[in-house]
Structures are given as structure tokens and as C-alpha cells.
Amino acid sequence: MGLGSPITRGPFGAAGWIGSILRRMDWLSVAAIGLLMVCGLGMAWINARSYGQELLDPSSIFLRSIIWISLSVITFTVVTAINWRWIRTFAWPLYGANLLLLIATLIFGQDSGGNSRAIAVFGIAIQSSEIAKILTLVALATVLTRESAEADTLSNTLLGGLVVAPPFILVAIQPDAGTALIIVAALFGGLLLSGAATRWIAGLAAFGVLVLPLAWTFLIADYQKERLIAFIDPNADPAGPKYQLEQALVAIRSGGLFGIGFDGTGGINPLPVQESDFVFAALVRSFGLVGGLLVIGLIGLLVARLIWHAWESPDSFGTVLGGGLAAIILFQGGVNIAMNLGIAPITGIPLPFVSYGGASAISLAFGLGLVQSHRVHQGGGA
């Protein structure tokens, strides 16, 4: 397939080209993304005030969130405008650069609580694991939809697993088990919607279960083991690894139906890492059950639209891309909310566009922009 797009500039030049893109965009997805970003900015404002920060100080959570969200909007817009075929053409160079960046992070990465998760480039800390999940998905969609691919064969399923394995291992040993699991979720989401045989997907999952003892021994850090044990053990010390969870549950219960307000300065002690891991608990404390359900509904709408795009896509690349990204956002949002509610172990997975963090927001914006590009330059979707 060539790199040409069915969208043309028409008799009105650039204006006609832009108008054609705007008409074909999935505005329900755009609305969900935009509202999640607004929620993220609202929580950044609350978190900055809770921590006693000056809102417009260069180091404040609020100002930095404005910058990250602005860059995410720009990324989404630019990627939407670019023909998705160009990105697919460079899938393997991007995949190779992705692996090199992950290796460089292990060697030169900045320590963050015992984790080599960020590498400084021109003074900017880049969290390579967040970038990896999207670039790996692009490579996965490319290999699963190659011309010679037979979706229901064992060899095709194994090939998908081989593409995902290197970035999974490199991310897991940073250690960043949460993002490593997100990459696995992308694999299963892509395989499921690509038409892979259920028996091969189940076999791949069974293999994953069999290697868990090896992962526990060689990939999972000691502090991660403590969190998992504390989650399983009802008698774990509440002042130990369970402290964060206990504080989050207290905050959620205090929120009630409509929350206690959003001033953020009312003598309320901030939750541990409430700007990222426990942002959902902080949100429910401020906006109550209504606010929590709103965020859950927005994530659900975004996932549903991605699945719909995958289902209605006129080509298999769009199917795998949409399905894989839906799995990423569903897993990421679901696990973050579940760990805030105490029904999943604490893994450090951010809530999409609501948790503080530039790498997560920009990488998701890139992936979502690529899905939109597939829609507007392919003319598919509903």
C-alpha cells in the first residue's frame, strides 16, 4: 500500500484539507480525552495547593501539568494530521530506537526511589518505559498485519510475543512492573482483535503463568514483593507497605456523594503520592462518588470508542492498533482505580491524563492521535 492518503486538499487548498480532517474525526473520543485532561489539570491545582506550592512557580505541579497537557494536545494534533502510513513505515526504526533508549535508561537512568526509570536528554527527564508501550504497540500492529500474516496460526501469535518480549523485559528490570504489565495487556488486546486463535492466546497466557516464579526471583524488586505480600496478607502492618492504601481508603470514604470541596487548603493532610498513584482517591475526596464515576465513565467511553474503531476498521492494522490501545487504557485506568479501592496491589500505574506525569500523557496522546490519523486518512470507523 502506498503512502498516499484519500484526503486531498480540494478546491480550497489547506482549508479544505483541514475541514476534511475535522469532519472525519471521532469527536466523542476527543471529548473524552479533553475532559480527562481537564480533570488532570483540576487535580494538579488541588495537589499543588495541598502541598503548599505557589501555583505559577516553575517547579509547581500545576504549572508543569499545564505544560505537559499543552504538549500532549500538540502531539495529538500533529499525529492526527500526519498520515498514519508514514509512522507504520518507520515502525521498526522506532522500535529499535525504543530498545536502545530502554537500554540507555538502565545504564544511565536517574534513580527514582530505587528505580532507573528516567534518562536526562538536554536536561529533560524522559521516562522511557512510557514511550515503550506505544512504540511497541506500533511494531506489534505492523508485524501482526504484514502481508504474509495468518492471524490464527501459532507462529503469528509467537511472533507477536517475540516483538513484545524485549521491551517487556527491559522495562521490568528497571524495575517498572506496572508498565511492563501494560505492554503485555497491549499484546493480548492486539492478538484478540487481530483474529488470533483463542487456544494460542490461552497458551501464551499459560506460559506467562508458568514463568511467574522466575519473574518473582529475577524481575520483581524487594519493595514490590513487600507490596504484593501486604496486599495478600490481611494482618500486614498498617504502618508498613499498607499505609498508603489505608490512607487512600480513608480519603475515599470521607468524600461521600459530592466530596468535601476542592479548595485544597482546608487543613487536610495530602495523601502519599496523591498526584500520581493515588490521584483517584484524592479526586473522590474532593468531588465525591459523582466525580469518581465521571472519570470512570470517561475512561469507559474512550475505551469503547477505541474498540469500535478496531471493529469497524477497513484494514487489520487499524484493528490491532485500536484493540491494543483500548487494552492499554483499560488496564492502566482499571488497575489504578482498583489499587485505590484496595482490590489490586499497588503497582504505580498512573490514571490516564489525570495522574501527574508528562511521559504518560504525551505517549497516550501519540497513540490516540495515531488512531485518529488512521480514521481520518483511511475514511473508516463510525
Image: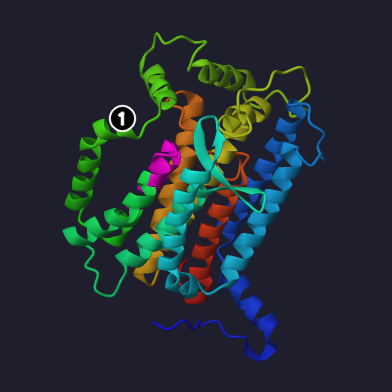
Of the pair 210 and 47, the residue shown nearer to us = 210
Quarter of the figure that contains the N terminus: bottom left
- Is residue 303 visible in the rendered image? The answer is no
Q: Quadrant of residue 356?
A: top right
Q: Where is residue 265 in the image (x, y as percent from the top left)?
A: 78, 23
Colour scheme: rainbow
Q: What stretch is highlighted in magenta?
A: 170-187
- Which residue is found at the position 50% from the left and 35% from the top? 115
- The residue sitting at the front extreme is 107
Q: Quadrant of residue 196?
A: bottom left
- The correct choice, above or below, for 378 with respect to 108 in the image is below
- The correct choice, above or below, for 11 with respect to 97 in the image is below
Q: Where is residue 360 in the image (x, y as percent from the top left)?
A: 56, 47
Q: Position of residue 67 (x, y in %)?
A: 72, 50
- Is residue 259 visible in the rendered image? The answer is yes
- The correct choice, above or below, for 58 with respect to 255 in the image is below
Q: Which amino acid does label 1 sit on?
A: Trp
Of the pair 111 and 263, the residue shown nearer to us = 111
- Give the prevailing secondary structure in the magenta stretch: helix
Q: For mark 1, give the secondary structure.
A: helix
Task: Left or right? Give the position of 243 relative to 44.
Answer: left
In the rendered structure, does residue 175 fall within the stretch colored magenta?
A: yes
**Neighbours of disc 1 within 10 Å: few (<14), some (14-19), many (20+):** few
- Which residue is found at the position 43% from the left and 52% from the top? 326
On the image, numbered disc 1 is attached to which residue? 216
Q: Quadrant of residue 215?
A: top left
Total numbered circles: 1
Q: Position of residue 132 (x, y in %)?
A: 46, 52
Of the pair 204 and 131, the residue shown nearer to us = 131
Of the pair 260 and 219, the residue shown nearer to us = 219
- Which residue is found at the position 45% from the left and 35% from the top? 335
- Which residue is found at the position 39% from the left and 56% from the top? 323
